[in-house]
Amino acid sequence: MSTILDKIIANRKEEVSRQKQLVPLTDVRSKIDLNSPRNSLSSQLLLKGTSGIIAEFKRRSPSKGIINDRVEPANITKGYAEGGASGLSVLTDNQYFGGSTTDFTNARNSNPTTPLLRKDFIVDEYQLFESRLLNADVILLIAAVLTKSEISRYTTIAHELGMEVLLELHAENELEKIDLFVDMIGINNRNLKDFKVDMDRSLRLLHQLPSEAVKISESGLNDPKTVDFLREQGFHGFLMGENFMKTEDPAATCANFISQLKIQ
């Protein structure tokens, strides 16, 4: 029986295949300006006094359906940054998350100097060049859907394009896929197969990560005290979206959340 993740990946592969026919890779590469500077999320997360919050713009999810379809990415992400977020994340998968590259571009234009993660399911190196054309600072690689060799190859390409890599793990059997050249390692507390949240997942995997890694806890975070605790344990970043997006004013909710953190 196929999981939600299986369906998402199959859909993304079909979409990328169609996109490659519409806009060949050679065309994408020819439009990339490698001289445009990128913003480093990993450096931002290591700064003293930073919130560590990576605030996400997400319209909907497979598990919750519509979360918030009444707000625009330009305003919300700008509000996130002004409220103290260390970085931003924007979903670009349309079928399952209601995102788009237009959402990403609008967020980028509103936040030229804030590190911005393109949150999507990378299944083809074409998406790396597409991400750089969108002026992404960071791309996400999900260990559950990529081989170790793909992770290494995509990381090399991303770095050649000036972008950072966030490698996302979900289980212990994915630890062997870690490429030491990735810039950040995230532990997703949400199981991508059934989308259930297990907050202990971060702690179980944390101490099995390379000591020098910039570590990020993802999903299911809804209490400032939990973030404070995870920071004390060794996490540098905290990817949050739904907790903010489910409210009438996500940016104000984010700012209020950050104001309650014990930032060192």
Image: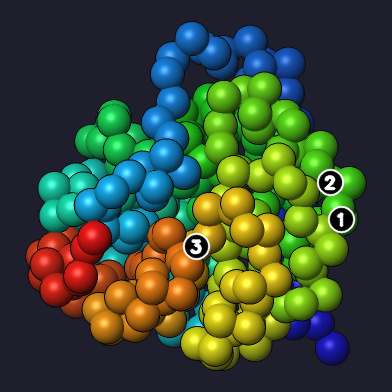
Element on which disc 2 rests: helix
Name the residue tied to disc 2.
150
**Residue 170 in view in this figure:** no
Name the image quarter holding the C terminus.
bottom left
Taking the spot 82% from the left edge, 59% from the top edge, the residue there is: 177
Query: Where does the image place residue 67, in percent across and percent down from the top left?
Result: 34, 76
**Residue 86 in view in this figure:** yes
- For residue 142, above or below residue 33: below
Residue 223: name its quadrant: bottom left
Q: Report the mark closest to the observer, 2 or 3.
A: 3
Name the residue tied to disc 3.
216
* Viewer-nearest residue: 140 or 120: 140
Q: How many marks?
A: 3
* Viewer-nearest residue: 129 or 214: 214
Q: Earlier in the sequence, mark 2 or mark 3?
A: 2
Residue type beneath disc 3 = Ile
Taking the spot 46% from the left edge, 66% from the top edge, the residue there is: 235
Describe residue 259's horizontal placement relative to residue 148 as left or right: left
Describe residue 58's horizontal placement relative to residue 94 as left or right: left
Taking the spot 57% from the left edge, 62% from the top edge, the residue there is: 186
Residue type beneath disc 1 = Thr
> What is the distance, in whole Å, between disc 2 and disc 3 at their CAs?
21 Å
Name the residue tied to disc 1.
147
Verify CB contact (< 8 Å) between mark 1 and mark 2: yes
Query: Where does the image place residue 69, in percent across and percent down from the top left?
Result: 29, 67
- For residue 247, above or below residue 17: below
Element on which disc 3 rests: strand
> What is the distance, in whole Å, between disc 1 and disc 2 at their CAs?
5 Å
Taking the spot 63% from the left edge, 10% from the top edge, the residue there is: 30
Q: Earlier in the sequence, mark 3 or mark 1?
A: 1
Query: Where does the image place residue 24, in percent across and percent down from the top left?
Result: 73, 23
Please tell me how crowded label 3 is: few (under 14), some (14-19), or many (20+) other residues with Cα within 10 Å. Answer: many
